[in-house]
Amino acid sequence: MRQMTLSPHLPGATVHRIPIDGVELAVETLGDGPAVMLLHGFPHTRAIWREVAPRLAAAGFRAIAPDLHGLGDSTPAVRGYQASAIATDLLRMLDALGDREAHVVGTDLGVTPAFAMAALSPERVTSLTLSEGLVGLLPGAESFLRQGPPWWFGFHQAPGGLAEDVLEDSAERYVRFFLSAGSRRGVPEDLTRVIVEAYRGRTSLRNAFEHYRAAPATAEWIGNWAQDQRLPMPTLAIGGGAIGAATAGQLEPITGRLTQHLLEDCGHITPIDQPDAFADLLIEHARNV
C-alpha cells in the first residue's frame, strides 16, 4: 500500500501528489526558475536525482522529479504505458504545477517518455536531454545492438506475467543486481534501500514490466513520427558506460541542434555516477537555449 503522506527524497524538496484522470503522480519540486523535468529509469525512482536536483536549484532552476507511472509512489497508468500516453500525463502534470514550458531530461526507461513529450508538444519543451536509453528502434544504435538487445528486455516483455512470477520472492536481489551493474561509483546503501522498497512485491514489479511490454508499440509510434518530423529544440545526448554514443546516433538524423557528450569514468546510471558533471551539462545546455 502506498503511503498517504509522502516524504521527499531530494534534500529540501517539496513533494506533491498530482491527480490526472485516475492517475496520481508523486513528484518533488526544488528551487525557483525555469523548470527542468527529470525522468528516471529502471530500477529507479525519483530519488536518483537527489544529487542533481540541488545543483539545478542552486543554479537558478526549478527541478521537477516525478515517479513514472506505477513506480515509486505513483499509481499505475490507466491509458497504457506507451510513451506517448505517459508523456501526455506528464505534460498535464506540468500544467498542474503551473509550468507552461520545461527543459526535459530522461535517462534509461525515461528516455522514451521524454522524447515523446518533445515530439508531441515541441512548443512546451525548451530543450531535451536524453541519457543512456534507446529512442525506440530508430537507426543509429546498430553498434550497441549488434549482438541483440539486452537479455532483460525480452524477459520483462514476456507475456502472462512471467517476469513478476519468477521474481516475486527475489525482487531485492534483482534490483540490487541492476544497481550494482549500472554504477561504477556504487549506489549508496541508503539510496539502494529506498529503491529496493519501491520494487518489493509482485504489483510493483508488474507495473515496471508494463513499461517494457509497451516498448514495441512505443517504438512503432516513434518510427512513424520520425518518417517526416524532426525535433526543433536544442537536444543533448549524454552517454555513459553502457549505451554510450548510441542515443546520439539515433538522434542525429532527426535534429539539427544536437550536442553530444560522453561522461568519463561513468557507468549506466549517469546521475548517480557523475552527478556534478551531469548537472553541469544540464545547466550549460539550458542556459544556451
Image (spheres, grey):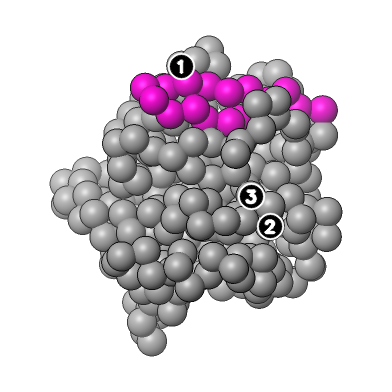
Q: Mark 1 against mark 2, which lies toward the viewer?
A: 2
Residue at position x 83%, y 60% in the image: 189
The region drawn magenta spans: 12-28
Quadrant location, the N terminus: top right
Residue 78 position in % (x across, y down): 34, 35
Residue at position x 63%, y 22% in the image: 16
Which comes before the other along the chain, label 3 or label 1?
1
**Residue 26 magenta:** yes
Q: Pick whichever, 122 or 190, lies toward us.
A: 190
Crowding around mark 1 (Cα neighbors within 10 Å: few <14, some 14 to 19, many 20+) is: few
Which residue is denoted by mark 1 in the rendering?
A: 95
Q: Mark 3 against mark 1, which lies toward the viewer?
A: 3
Residue at position x 44%, y 40% in the image: 76
User: Predominant secondary structure in magenta?
Assistant: strand
Instruction: Report the Cα–Cα distance between label 3 and label 1.
Output: 27 Å
Amino acid residing under circle 3: Ala
For label 3, the SS is helix
Instruction: Report the Cα–Cα distance between label 1 and label 2.
Output: 31 Å
Amino acid residing under circle 1: Asp
Q: Quadrant of residue 232?
A: top left
Which residue is denoted by mark 3 in the rendering?
A: 198
For label 1, the SS is helix
Q: In the picture provided, is 68 more to the left or to the right than 145? A: right
Q: In the picture provided, is 17 more to the left or to the right than 165? A: right
Whether pointer 2 and pointer 3 mark residues with C-beta atoms closer than 8 Å, the reply is yes
Crowding around mark 3 (Cα neighbors within 10 Å: few <14, some 14 to 19, many 20+) is: many
Amino acid residing under circle 2: Val
Q: In the picture provided, is 216 more to the left or to the right than 129? A: left
Q: Does 7 sit above or below residue 18?
A: below
Q: Pick whichever, 102 or 50, lies toward us.
A: 50
